Image (tube, helix red, strand yellow):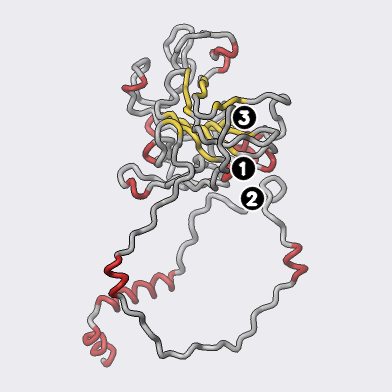
Amino acid sequence: MTPLQQMNFDQWWFHGYINNPPKAGVFMDLPAGGTFHGEVHCTKAFTSAMGRYVGQDIMGCNTPGGDGKGGALHTTDTWGIPASQTKDVKGCGLAIAYKSDPHAIKPEDFTVISTNDKCPWRRSVDFQIPKDLPACPPGGCHCLWGWIHAPDAGTEQMYQLMYRCQVTGATGTRALPAPQVARKCPTDKSNCTVGAKQPHYWLQNERNNNYQHWTDAPYYNSDYGFSNGAQTDLWATAPKPAVSSAAASSAKPVVSSAKPVVSSAKPAATSSKAAAAAPSVDYLNTPMQITNQAPPKRDVEDAEEEEQQIERRRVPPQARRAMEAL
């Protein structure tokens, strides 16, 4: 698997193989309320699918000598220790998009449904699947496996793989809500994104949803609000701030005597022809407009005006009037 780093959208999305789907009728099965048993390895030749080490729980980058030189797990943890003792393994995530046509899928359509915070370490990796997932459409869903490693163990990259998948034994009837970007919250848990969350799209030339520096990688673990295992908060919503009944009852309405200002300016007319000619955003047929650019910088004059307003608020009214009279 080629790591993804500073690539254009058509290069990193589906690894550039969006026009090369699996054979018809081939799906990765996700048992609703059960466990998906998968494998991760640095070399496909050492997976059980290729007849190697069948039934053995080997390391994720094992070689015939068991020396770990078959690839990089990108961690500073000691090779071969139990997964429970690792400190630098940052976790993997499994996401789903309820669309059968890969060309219709946008990055924000994927919802992370399960994580494993000790992945990748051993070749065998389990993902618990939420029990309330609805069934996929007739042509199936698409799934995404994602992983980003710690910056202290190699050049930073983003790892992702796509699959055609389906939810088996589904009894859920509620559609997944639109997922949001997972916010960083290692200590302040009130900053965690509540509810369905998107995978991390990071360190590419365009279509990122995370703009952190390459030394500040995002992970699929509790630092970003992901619980280990099935994500049980998919339909949860952030609590609204409480309003004190005492404060609400004592507050008096403010009546303004100011007359409304009526503007004589006429609204600008919009040409229906021009509106019809405006192209819709299509991530395959239109050059990308959403890139990893930083937020626009404030004008120097705006910044100076804001600083002056702050300074005026600091000076008492009497002193300010005296200064202005000079």
Label 1 close to label 2 by CB (< 8 Å)? yes
Structural distance between the alpha carbons of marks 3 and 2: 28 Å
Is residue 253 something that shows in the picture?
Answer: yes
Specify the label residue 118 is tagged with.
none
What is the quadrant of the N terminus in the image?
Answer: top right
**Is 6 in front, or is 310?**
310
- Tell me the residue at 50%/48% (across/down): 180
Q: Point out residue 55 in the picture as x, y percentages from the top left corner.
A: 50, 9
Residue type of the residue flagged with mark 3: Cys
Structural distance between the alpha carbons of marks 1 and 3: 23 Å
Structural distance between the alpha carbons of marks 1 and 2: 8 Å
What residue does disc 3 label? 165
Q: Point out residue 171 in the picture as x, y percentages from the top left corner.
A: 57, 33
- Tell me the residue at 55%/88% (across/down): 262
Q: Point out residue 325 in the picture as x, y percentages from the top left corner.
A: 27, 92
Specify the label residue 9 is tagged with.
1
Secondary structure, mark 2, is loop
Residue type of the residue flagged with mark 1: Phe
What residue does disc 2 label? 288
Q: Point out residue 18 in the picture as x, y percentages from the top left corner.
A: 68, 35
